[in-house]
Image (spheres, helix red, strand yellow):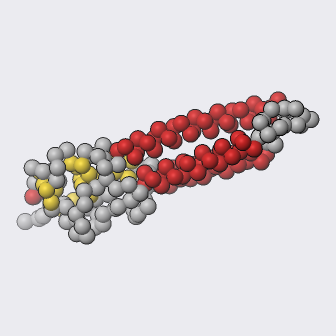
């Protein structure tokens, strides 16, 4: 009799900063770093930017980093201690979770729980596995994730506004005018 085993890793990820990493996560971080470099170039290449705006952009990037770390360290999993997950055997049942029992974690789980195959843990009220941050989103960290999304959207909108303002200002600035600390030409 051949026992069919589904390939399940023998680890349980607790945060986004643990192996295995996802290519989308690397793209997300790389894009974030490129954005900082491009904005730094705009700041140093165009000398028409007031100090308060440079400080604001730096503050926004610091807040974005804090939000990324805040949500990436959140764990949506149901704790089971140090036990390693068991390989899933298809002959045990058709599904990983049956009758509120996870056959991989070998524990009873609440209703609306799903076992994430990427993180290899059970997530209560599983919403999705975010490939960009490499975390599961569920009951325990849903608010953190939504705070992260709202914060990033607001900051990216403000940063896009800043970039447009900088480009327009540099296009019309010939260098002969002086700029005071409030950003107005003298």
Is the C terminus in the top left, top right, bottom left or bottom right quadrant? top right
Q: The N terminus is located in which quarter?
A: bottom left
* Image location of residue 57, percent across then percent down: 65, 44
Using the image as rendered, state which of residue 117 and residue 41 is in the foreground: 41
Vertical comparison of 16 with 61: above or below = below
Residue furthest to the right: 176
| Quadrant of the image occupied by residue 83 | bottom left
Horizontal relation, residue 60 to residue 10: left or right? right
Counting from the top left corner in percent of width and height, residue 33 is at 60, 52
| Front one among 38 and 92 | 38
Given residues 145 and 32, the one toward you in this image is 145
Residue 101 can be seen in this image: yes
Q: Please give the count of numbered marks on the rendered protein.
A: 0
Residue in view at x 53 percent, y 36 percent: 154
Any part of residue 25 in sight: no
**Residue occupying image coordinates x 16% and y 53%:** 109
Q: Give coordinates of residue 126: x percent, y percent.
A: 27, 46
Give the residue displayed 25% in from the left and 45% down from the top.
125
**Quarter occupied by residue 156:** top right
Q: Residue at x 16, y 56 (%)?
A: 102
Image side of residue 71 versus residue 99, left or right: right
* Depth check, front residue: 59 or 110: 59
Q: Give left or right: position of 86 versus 24.
A: left
Q: Position of residue 171 (x, y in %)?
A: 80, 32
Q: Is residue 150 left or right of residue 94?
A: right
């Amino acid at each position: 009799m051949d026992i069919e085993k589904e390939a399940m890793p023998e680890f349980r990820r607790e945060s986004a900063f643990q192996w295995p990493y996802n290519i989308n996560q690397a793209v997300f971080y790389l894009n974030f770093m490129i954005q900082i470099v491009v904005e730094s170039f705009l700041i140093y290449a165009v000398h028409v930017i007031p100090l308060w705006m440079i400080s604001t952009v730096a503050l926004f990037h610091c807040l974005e980093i804090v939000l990324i770390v805040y949500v990436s360290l959140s764990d949506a999993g149901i704790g089971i201690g140090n036990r390693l997950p068991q390989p899933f055997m298809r002959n045990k049942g058709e599904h990983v979770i049956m009758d509120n029992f996870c056959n991989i974690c070998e524990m009873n789980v609440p209703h609306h729980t799903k076992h994430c195959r990427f993180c290899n843990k059970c997530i209560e009220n599983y919403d999705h596995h975010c490939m960009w941050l490499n975390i599961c989103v569920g009951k325990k960290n849903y608010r953190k994730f939504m705070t992260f999304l709202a914060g990033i959207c607001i900051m990216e909108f403000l940063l896009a506004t800043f970039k447009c303002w900088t480009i327009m200002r540099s296009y019309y600035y010939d260098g002969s005018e002086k700029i005071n600390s409030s950003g107005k030409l003298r």
